[in-house]
């Protein structure tokens, strides 16, 4: 279905419970970045209640976002 050029980055995914460190690009943010790094740190997403229910709400939000961007 998709054909990508280039190579898959070696640092994808979590290693030792952490994602790859942020790089110096404006669209690269992480809740695991240094909290003093104002350009790259974002607060972790919070939820209340049941984790499975919160995950399902997140899935619905992502699906709605994908549907809305397809119409662009």
Image (cartoon, rainbow, N blue to C red):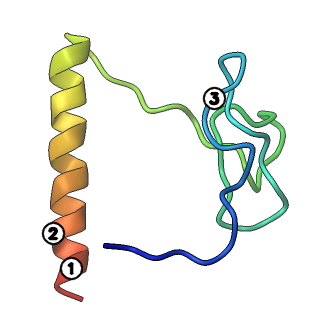
Which x, y percent locates residue 30? 65, 42
Residue 6 occupies which quadrant of the picture? Answer: bottom right
**Residue drawn 15% across the image and 69% down it:** 67
- Depth check, mark 3 against mark 1: the one in front is 3
Residue 7 drawn above or below residue 1: above
- Depth check, mark 2 against mark 3: the one in front is 3
Q: Residue 47 got which mark?
A: none
Q: Residues within 10 Å of mark 3 (few under 14, many from 20)?
A: few
Q: Which residue is mark 3?
A: 14
Q: Residues within 10 Å of mark 1 (few under 14, many from 20)?
A: few
- Image quadrant in which the N terminus is located: bottom left
- Alpha-carbon span between mark 1 and mark 2: 5 Å
Whether the residues at callouts 2 and 3 have beta carbons within 8 Å, the answer is: no
Whether the residues at callouts 1 and 2 have beta carbons within 8 Å, the answer is: yes
Q: Which residue is mark 2?
A: 67
Whether the residues at callouts 3 and 1 have beta carbons within 8 Å, the answer is: no
Residue 62 drawn above or below residue 45: below
Q: Which residue is mark 1?
A: 70
Residue 31 occupies which quadrant of the picture? Answer: top right
Which element carries disc 1, helix, strand or loop? helix
Chain-order first, disc 3 or disc 1: 3
Chain-order first, disc 2 or disc 3: 3
**Residue drawn 25% across the image and 76% down it:** 69
Which element carries disc 3, helix, strand or loop? loop
- Alpha-carbon span between mark 2 and mark 3: 28 Å
Which x, y percent locates residue 23? 82, 55
Residue 7 occupies which quadrant of the picture? Answer: bottom right
* Observer-nearest of 9 and 1: 1
């Amino acid at each position: 279905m998709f054909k990508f050029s280039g190579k898959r980055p070696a640092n994808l995914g979590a290693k030792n419970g952490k994602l790859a460190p942020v790089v110096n690009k404006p669209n690269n943010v992480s809740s695991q970045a240094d909290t003093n790094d104002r350009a790259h740190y974002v607060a972790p997403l919070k939820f209340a209640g049941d984790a499975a229910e919160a995950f399902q709400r997140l899935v619905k939000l992502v699906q709605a976002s994908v549907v809305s961007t397809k119409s662009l």
